[in-house]
Amino acid sequence: MRAMADVRVELDDITTIAVDAIVNAANESLLGGGGVDGAIHRRAGSGLLEACLEIPELRPGVRCLPGDARITPGFALPARFVIHTVGPIWRDGERGERETLASCYRRVFALCAQHGIRSVAIPAISCGAFGFPMAEGARIAAQEIGEALASGLPIDRVLLVAFEGDARTAITKAVRAAGLSS
């Protein structure tokens, strides 16, 4: 039986982590924005914007729908790839936000499998500017990671990257409750 992947929570700058892929909590245009998205675009350099512009629009200004993901090279980042996923904007929890967030994680792990990605760093998708409640977002992340690993996803390391101490605490609690970390 294959050993379980190393799942860790870190308080760090995701743009500095040397892994196969980092996940970008993107907006539908994939052309950069605030928070993690803007930081990733700035650090990766202009090649990332050019690669995102090459992704076909689904409709004007939309290259990726909420709950889906796209992959590009990492360019000047220490990561080989950037997986861009568009999380839900939290409205009231009654508009499919939870399922859309879970879909983000499933699509990220599907791209990991398709591209031979063995290590991935993931921010708290939708839990910043998009307003998803941190504890609930962390629980969904831990659940989807657990399901991906149980399915035999060939991955060695999953880093959940918190942007501040309270986020790290919430994510650590969810990961431990899911039995993914000691």
Image (cartoon, grey):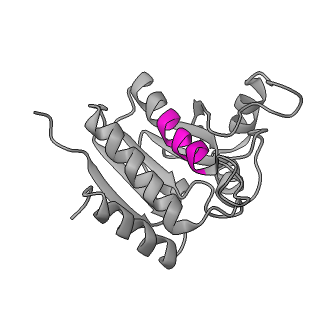
The answer to whether residue 24 is seen in the rendering is yes
The location of residue 147, given as percent across then percent down, is 34, 41
Q: Nearer the viewer, residue 50 or 156?
A: 156
| Direction left: furthest residue | 1
Q: Nearer the viewer, residue 142 or 54?
A: 142
* Residue at position x 79%, y 24% in the image: 58
Q: Identify the magenta region.
A: 98-108
* Dominant SS in magenta: helix
The location of residue 12, given as percent across then percent down, is 48, 66
The location of residue 49, given as percent across then percent down, is 75, 37
In this view, 176 is above or below 56: below
Q: Nearer the viewer, residue 29 or 17?
A: 29
The answer to whether residue 80 is seen in the rendering is no
Which quarter of the figure has residue 148? top left
| Direction bottom: furthest residue | 165
Location of the C terminus by quadrant is: bottom left
* Residue at position x 55%, y 67% in the image: 134
* Residue at position x 76%, y 30% in the image: 63
